[in-house]
Amino acid sequence: MTATARLPSAGRVLAGAAGGVAVAALLAFRLAGHDEFVTDPVGVLALAAGATGAAVAATRLARVGNRRAGTLATWLCAALLAYLVLAAWAVWAVTAGHPTAALAVAAWNSAWIPPLALMQLTASAAIRTGARAPWTHPVLAAAIGTVTLANALLTTASEPFTGLPTIAPESWRTVIEPVGAFATLLGVLALLLVPVTLWRAALGSEGSARARIGIAAAGATAAPFTVCFCLLLAIARDPGAVEPSLGSVAFLVALAGASAFSTACALIAARGGVERRQVAIVVRGTGLAGAAMAVIGTGTVIAAPGLRLGATSVAFLVAAVTAVVGGGAWTGTGRLTRILTPQVPQAPNDKGLAAPTGGVPVTGLTPREAEVLAVLAEGASNAGIAAQLVVSERTVDAHLRAIFVKLGLTPDAETNRRVRATRIWLDHAAANRDHRG
């Protein structure tokens, strides 16, 4: 998942063709009377749209110079198309009673997991420079790969069943239950790793760096939100008594929507020059989506037949929960938007760096020290610099000490050395622009 090699052109064409055939096959199955949720046009077309959006994002990310994020977006597109292909295979195999039916269902039942990691990796890679990947990327890829394999080997559809089973828990059984539970916990924790590290880097930074890293963090948050939505569907099934097929279609739409959201965040973060309006849309969208899930989950429990509450009581309680949770989310996301977009001067470069590449470097600094100073001038904290340059915070600290010495910034004003170094870099960038002009 973290490989930088691009999916070959022939492979992209083949994946697109296979996805198109799968969509057509699933819709044809639907017209032929196969009413499984996996053939529902809403879910099928949503996944196809999500794959198309990822493909468009991959092209645009490569165009702005972020090939790693573009490659990961390409693989996200391929993963969503593979999900559709496996769904078509599973429907055909089950319908025809083919010997590969069990294998097809097992593969299809696990194919929704890799896109979760790929959407996180795409958003995270959008703010990185250089060829190296941060340590969180291989850890996430290994964990999600393990979870996908464990799910395929340990989880099987309950027999007998008509067509493909829904995501309702009673439709599936897990052998060696403790191992399955551990794999699930591992997957959940792995999906929290990238968002937590990115939010930490964003909130510790300043200026445009805070906004860019915050956008990437929001994009990475879409994956755990999708998992939360899946858990919400379990609540909706029991005690909410919601039809499993309807919930399963909703999950497919949520997966596609999360993919589109993550790739959109990657594009915004990679382009740099993030506007306050863009941050507001992303942050409010993330916060309100979480609030909506909380309201739906709580409302489902309140309205459950087992509680035997009257219609008036249910309506009042749901309205109260909506007001509290929705109002809190609106207020909180507004405050977070202001935190991520303080009114400070932006770095004079639409890529987010404080000086254009190719200019005369600050005298005495190594190229790597110049990179560190450029990101510092963007407002990044040590964690933010480490996140973007893919180095450890200890390395960043060492580079900063060397930079301060070379720039003649004495430690007698420790709290101001970062500001003074930023001022030197911005003045130098301005001089470079005047010189070229």
Image (cartoon, helix red, strand yellow):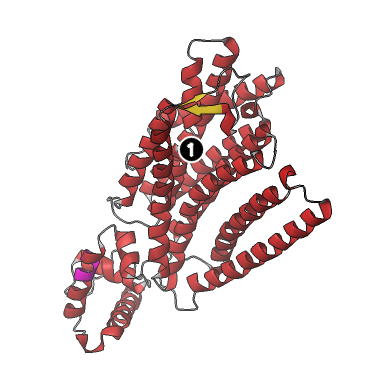
Left or right of 219 on screen, residue 298? right
Q: Nearer the viewer, residue 64 or 141?
A: 141
- Where's residue 398, x and y in %? 19, 69
* Residue drawn 17% across the image and 79% down it: 405
Q: Nearer the viewer, residue 39 or 378?
A: 39
Q: Locate residue 407: give its quadrant.
A: bottom left
- Look at the picture and state if 145 lies above or below 165: below
- Look at the picture and state if 228 lies above or below 86: below
Residue 9 seen in this snapshot: no
Callout 1 secondary element = helix
User: Which residue is the site of mark 1?
Assistant: 77
- Where's residue 235, x and y in %? 62, 43
In the rendered image, residue 397 lying in the magenta stretch gets the answer yes
Q: Nearer the viewer, residue 232 or 353?
A: 232
* Residue drawn 49% across the image and 40% down it: 55
Left or right of 84 on screen, residue 70? left
Task: Please name the amino acid that badge 1 sits on.
Answer: Cys
- Look at the picture and state if 135 lies above or below 208: above
> Label 1 neighbourhood size at 10 Å, few (<14), some (14-19), many (20+)?
many
Query: What is the quadrant of the N terminus in the image?
Result: top left
- Look at the picture and state if 50 lies above or below 103: below
- Where's residue 246, x and y in %? 68, 35
Query: What is the quadrant of the C terminus in the image?
Result: bottom left
Over which residues does the magenta segment extend? 395-399
- Where's residue 336, x and y in %? 53, 69
In the rendered image, residue 392 lying in the magenta stretch gets the answer no
Q: Main secondary structure of the magenta part?
A: helix
* Residue drawn 30% across the image and 50% down it: 133
